[in-house]
Amino acid sequence: MRYWFPYPLLSFALMLFWLLINQSLSPAQILLGAALGISHAWLMVNLRPTKTHMKKAWLVGRLMATVVIDVAKSNIMVMGVILRRRNRPVNSGFVPIHLTLRDENALAILACILTATPGSAWLEFDSQTQVLLLHVLDIENGTAWAELIRTRYEAPLKELFE
């Protein structure tokens, strides 16, 4: 059974997503959603994602709360930057950040967090040197940004995954 359905939860989630998008529970849509879910799960087999085990699962809630609060604060700060643009020019720039995070899934979560936060964008990560290049909309102190990323996001992700 595992051979035919390598990721059954992913297949089921994709089928549900398909049904939600189409807003229909007709047999044809269910069949099409199931076919899409199973076929796309097979695409994941070819990617061979690494298995990860979270060590302290209770930290997920704390990290999610931190991200939600930071996204809200960042939205307000970006709005301030846009509104005061006439008085003071925007000082955007690039910040290189040395990361000690090694787990690929933790790095992917960090990329999602940083890209979802308004005013910052994950540009590139060099796996050889472990340096992340981050673009920041309004940068005043690059070392402060690097320290913020390391303490607020990297440290909890290291506790979770390493």
Image (cartoon, rainbow, N blue to C red):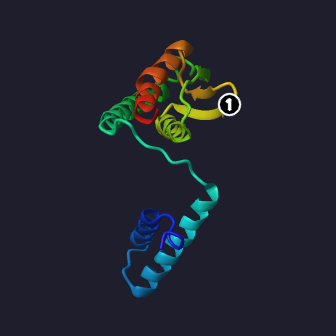
Element assignment for label 1: strand
The residue at which mark 1 appears reads as 126
Residue 90 on image: x %, y %: 56, 22
Residue 28 on image: x %, y %: 45, 86
Amino acid type indicated by mark 1? Asp
- Is residue 150 among the parts visible in the rendering? yes
Could you say which is closer to the camera, residue 6 or residue 125?
A: 6
Could you say which is closer to the camera, residue 11 or residue 79?
A: 11
Residue neighbourhood size for the residue with mark 1, other residues' Cα within 10 Å, grouped as few (<14), some (14–19), many (≥20): few
Could you say which is closer to the camera, residue 6 or residue 104?
A: 6
Q: Is residue 28 above or below residue 55?
A: below
What residue appears at the point 52 percent right and 42 percent down from the top-left corner?
105
Residue 21 on image: x %, y %: 43, 69
How many marks are shown on the rendered structure? 1
Q: Is residue 5 above or below residue 64?
A: below
- Is residue 141 among the parts visible in the rendering? no
Q: Is residue 101 above or below residue 88?
A: below
What residue appears at the point 64 percent right and 32 percent down from the top-left corner?
125
Q: Which quarter of the picture shows residue 55?
A: top left
What residue appears at the point 60 percent right and 54 percent down from the top-left corner?
48
Q: Is residue 35 above or below residue 150?
A: below
